[in-house]
Image: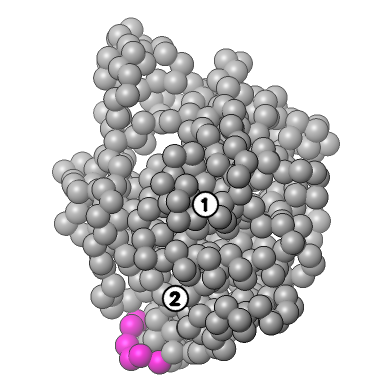
Amino acid sequence: MKTLKVPNTYDISLSGAPSLTVSEFLSVSQVAVLPSTISHLKPKLTVKIGDSVARGQAVAFDKLSPEVKLVSPVSGTVKDIVYGQKRRLDAILISCSGDAVETHSSYTKDTLNSLDAATLKQLLLKSGLWPSFVALPFMGLAPAEGDVPAIYVAVNDDEPFAPHASVVLKGKQDQFRFGLAALKKLSKSVVVSAAMGNEIAGTALSDVVDVLVEGKYPANQPATVAYNAKPDATHNKAWTIKCQDVIAIGEFLSTGVFPNTRVIALAGPKVKEPQHMRVTVGSPIKDVVAGRCDDSVALRYIAGGVLTGRNAGLDSYLGFNENAINVLQDEFDSEFMNFVGLGPKKATYSRAYLGAAMGAKKWDYHTGVNGSARDCVACGYCAEVCSVGILPQFLMRNVVAGDVDESLAHGLLDCSECGLCTFVCPSKIELTDMFVSQKTALLEETR
């Protein structure tokens, strides 16, 4: 087992970490399939309003790779289809009723061994689980065609606040192993990483974990591990997948039925009792958080991690790859002459405030940026937290100038999109958004 020490990581010390208890929230009247939350997917409908659908039945597919299906997580009726700007397909709303299920072939360990890679790939493409794979370097939907140079599997997810590995794996280790066996048929190189000190990785899963990772966020993000552990340039186009998605693949192959529940973390400073919850895929955020948050102030509901998640809104739903709801205060009154205060109650990366001396204190962050747009001050803090060795302030200048060649030379495609550079920037420049937009534009040119 290899040990990997990832440089330039940082703990943002957010309050509201979820407890290890798990409550169930599976009874919902309506769910949604959100194609717009899957990067680089161009969806096309296969259903219309009023159609009856079974659990696991395709409701949309990718125009560029029609083999990639999005499926309904429940049995029911298509209630509405929601479009965004430029007729972008944002959501397919499905009211829950009945117990119709679309089934596929199921496998045991022995029958899986006899399955060839091409057949397995076609099965996963139809299953609705294909969007679990994220392809480097563009961090989007994995291509349906071509070979897979490597697959990086992350046991731990260290972004605040993703589900804890011990909760996700509890009672699911056999399904995880079965999912791993399937991945090893898709690629000759499957790299499983886990955080240093992970008890399960050191005991029950010690035989399958290849890399123990030392570092704070984003050390355990699969894209970060891939950058720091890759043996050669072929892994620049590796795929990544998270632990719970591997479990889902194992469950699907062993039962032949789309696994429609996930463990999520309901956490953050404004959650009354931060915890883990088992929910139905596509559940309404409003129903999941009802009565569980401090609504005495304006709130922001972030679907996914605090730094990489989506500003979902209370009336939205959980997307397929969104494994958390983080709740922060959304409005914050400006302080008079705050720039002359000592700031003992303020978090700071740069040690500009006295709060930097507070040790291991957890902070009740809010979404305010304390001012309007500001210019880069060349502080270099962004480079200090870049775990893939980019100099974000120089990359930003090339992106703004539209110089694609220089952007690539400064490591644009190495960006793991962790969001830390934006977080520590004293000018609050949306660095990660800039890099993601440039990468997306570059991908569109190559299609």
Question: At 40% from the left edge and 20% from the top edge, which residue is drawn?
Answer: 348
Question: At 21% from the left edge and 59% from the top edge, which residue is drawn?
Answer: 290
Mark 1 lies on residue: 206
For the residues labelled 1 and 2, the Cα–Cα distance comes to 26 Å
Q: Nearer the viewer, residue 124 or 429?
A: 124
Does residue 194 belong to the magenta stretch?
no
Amino acid type at mark 2: Pro
Which-is-in-front pick, marks 1 and 2?
A: 1
Q: Nearer the viewer, residue 116 or 41?
A: 116
Q: Nearer the viewer, residue 121 or 425?
A: 121
Position in image of residue 54 (x %, y %)? 44, 88
Question: At 25% from the left edge and 55% from the top edge, which residue is drawn?
Answer: 21
Q: Does residue 162 lie above or below 38 as drawn?
A: above
Mark 1 or mark 2: which comes first in sequence?
1
Please state if 121 lies on the left or on the right of 8 as rendered.
right
Amino acid type at mark 1: Ser
Q: Which span of residues is magenta-colored?
A: 95-100
Q: Main secondary structure of the magenta part?
A: loop
Please state if 374 lies on the left or on the right of 4 as rendered.
left
Judged from the image, the secondary structure of the residue bearing numbered disc 2 is loop
Within 10 Å of disc 1 (Cα), the crowding (few <14, some 14-19, many 20+) is some
Position in image of residue 4 (x %, y %)? 60, 36
Q: Does residue 328 lie above or below 74 as drawn?
A: above
Q: Quadrant of the C terminus?
A: bottom right
Position in image of residue 439 (x %, y %)? 70, 46
